[in-house]
Image (cartoon, rainbow, N blue to C red):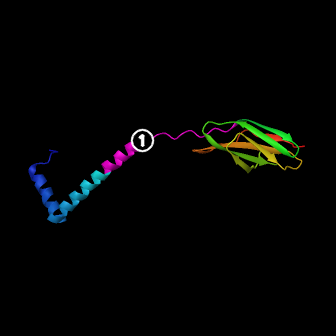
Amino acid sequence: MGEFSIFHWLVVLAIVLILFGGRKIPEVMKGLGEGIRSFKDGMAGAANQGTAPAAAAPIAAPTGVTAKPDHGRVSITWSPSAGASNYNVKRSGTSGGPYALIASTAVTSYSDEGLATGTYYYVVTSVGSYGESVNSMEVGATPA
């Protein structure tokens, strides 16, 4: 009881042959084999994706940003960031932004010239192979 005898298996085989016909069985088995092969390939691909290298950390924002006012200009300097190939200098007329890009440079200083009287606020971002950093600390200056 609970086990199939050979007679039971023969009856099941006869029913399958009647329902599907002798020619359909190889097609069904071929489809089953392709499905199993596709499943194995998918599992192998998922295992390979799990071993992919981790993404690099984002580039750090410049530190030590200073703004020195002069007659109609402001000189901005900052410390270099590891991995940076360029720096974006941004300016705003209000503290906290929004900031407009005014220069992109490969060196760690910039002179913003031709300024009217008023207070200007600056931030600097680092740009590298992994994109652009967040804004540096804001500095302000009022040219004479």
- Of residue 57 and residue 44, the one placed in the foreground of this image is 57
Q: Residue at x 19, y 64 (%)?
A: 24
Q: Quadrant of the N terminus?
A: top left
> Residue 26 at x, y = what percent?
18, 60
Q: Is residue 95 visible?
A: no
Q: Is residue 109 visible?
A: yes
Tell me the amino acid under the disc marked 1: Gly
Q: Residue at x 37, y 47 (%)?
A: 45
Residue on which disc 1 sits: 50
- Of residue 133 and residue 4, the one placed in the foreground of this image is 133
Q: Quadrant of residue 124?
A: top right
Relative to 41, say whether 66 is above or below. Answer: above
Left-right relation of 129 to 144: left
Q: Quadrant of the C terminus?
A: top right
Q: Residue at x 85, y 40 (%)?
A: 69
- From which residue to which does the magenta span run? 39-62
